[in-house]
Amino acid sequence: MNSIKRLTIGKADVVFLRVDFNVPVKDGIIKDTKRIDAALPTIKYLLEKDARIIVASHLGRPSGIGYEEGFSLKPVFEKLQEYLGSANVKYSKQVIGEDVNSRVSDLQPGQILLLENLRFHKAEKKGDTEFAKQLSALGAKFYVNDAFGTMHREHASVFTLPGLFPMENKAMGFLVEKEYMYLNEKLTTPERPYSVISGGAKVKDKIGLLETMIVQADHILIGGGMMFTFLKAKGYNVGKSLLEEESLDIASRIMERAGDKLVLPLDTLAVDSIESPKYKEIRDVNAMQDSDIGVDIGPRTCELFSGLIVKSGSVVFNGPMGIFEIDEYARGTVAVIDAMAECEGITVVGGGDSASSVKKFNKSDKMSHISTGGGASLGMLSGVNLPGFRALEE
Ligand code: AMP
């Protein structure tokens, strides 16, 4: 896979840079600039090369039939001007067409043209070849993808467009390269023991991950709401805890194939109501009552999991151990995060809720890597060669 540093970009060469500027915007104000900040190293690198840069992104879910103010990238344009100097950053209300072509021609070396939201065209999400050709007709010589959060999508700008560039002219940006290094290279030949912590709500979302980890990992630690589907499949009463009836068979199959690798909780924090409990009890998993709702792993499980995590050479954390959004039910998630922080091996946090929980408990700087993409990181950990990467390789 090409790194951006291997591209032979010359002064005034045009580069098409796909980024993920899908930032939260309210009343025209960006509420969190994290995603813009994350793309800056790649943008600055290209600016130092004196390239002319076409920057493209999606934002939210517009209807796909043209410009919609609420999904405009204009606030991002203003932020980029603030970061990089107003003279260096231009904006195009169009995504494709003659007007955009002439704006690209007018670009000076070391200048950026930010296109409007790619998803103003339905063709983007459809991976449409004609649309990709029109993007390609903007005249870029190089294609760089730094939009990790979209790598699992077969969208036109992520999958179809790079297919139109020769291998030597397309590459990963710095953000995508770091994700690739941790989620692929370092975990394909992991330092052992390799422990995977899997939690969160749904078994269904994690089947691919669990099946891959049966082959790759040494320990698969199960927590979160999904643990109850496993416990039920073992024949235990799980009371009123989260249960995915339709995944009972697959849970049994996974347990059978994984054998000792799969480590289920020993105990759980049980309540009779999530919002206003009359009782909160630690229960052994084989002694749950009909009225119980399991909201977290219990203390003996925290100890068991922490012991395995601390001694691991590589750890992946995907999905919280309980309803961590409520402080009283966050102890298991905190225990796992603390053990990861203490672990001297490689510690990787999947995107989405796992990343938010690590941030919430202030341990971000203690992890080797926190992924910026939920679906994309889960896909990679499940062993899928994501469309965005395939398009850079072919
Ligand atoms: P996921 O998106 O599948 O990773 O699920 C994350 C969500 O799972 C979080 O919002 C947690 O609150 C929720 N969760 C974790 N443990 C439990 C549990 N025991 N019961 C219900 N929801 C849970």
Image (spheres, helix red, strand yellow):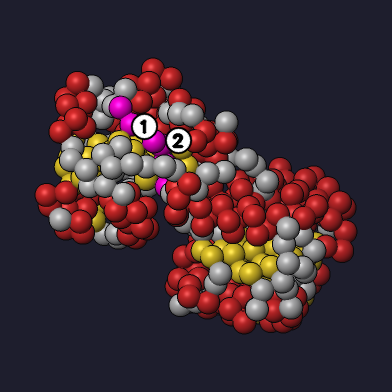
Q: Give the structural element (helix, strand or loop) at label 1.
A: loop
Query: Identity of the amino acid at label 2?
Result: Asn
In x, y percent, where is residue 116? 24, 36
Relative to the observer, which residue lies in front, 56 or 212? 56
In magenta, the rendered stretch is 139-147
- Marks 1 and 2, how far apart at CA: 7 Å
Q: Residue at x 11, y 49 (%)?
A: 87
Q: Residue at x 40, y 32 (%)?
A: 157
Q: Quadrant of the N terminus?
A: top right
Which residue in the rendered view is the most extreme toward the left? 87
Query: Identity of the amino acid at label 1?
Result: Lys
Q: To which residue does mark 1 refer?
A: 141
In x, y percent, where is residue 200? 60, 59
Crowd class of label 2 (few under 14; some 14 to 19; many from 20; radius 10 Å):
many
Say if residue 85 shows up in the picture: yes
Question: Residue 237 is drawn in which quadrant?
Answer: bottom right
Identify the mark at residue 315; answer none if there is no mark.
none
Residue contact at pointers 1 and 2, CB within 8 angstroms: yes
Relative to the observer, which residue lies in front, 80 or 330? 80
Q: To which residue does mark 2 refer?
A: 169
Crowd class of label 1 (few under 14; some 14 to 19; many from 20; radius 10 Å):
some
In x, y percent, where is residue 20? 37, 47
Relative to the observer, which residue lies in front, 72 or 300? 72
Q: Is 46 left, or right, of 206 in this rendering?
A: left
Is 278 part of what is drawn in magenta? no
Q: Give the structural element (helix, strand or loop) at label 2.
A: helix
Q: Earlier in the sequence, mark 1 or mark 2?
A: 1
Q: Residue at x 15, y 56 (%)?
A: 85
Q: Is residue 272 positioned above or below 227 on the image? A: below
Relative to the observer, which residue lies in front, 195 or 387? 387
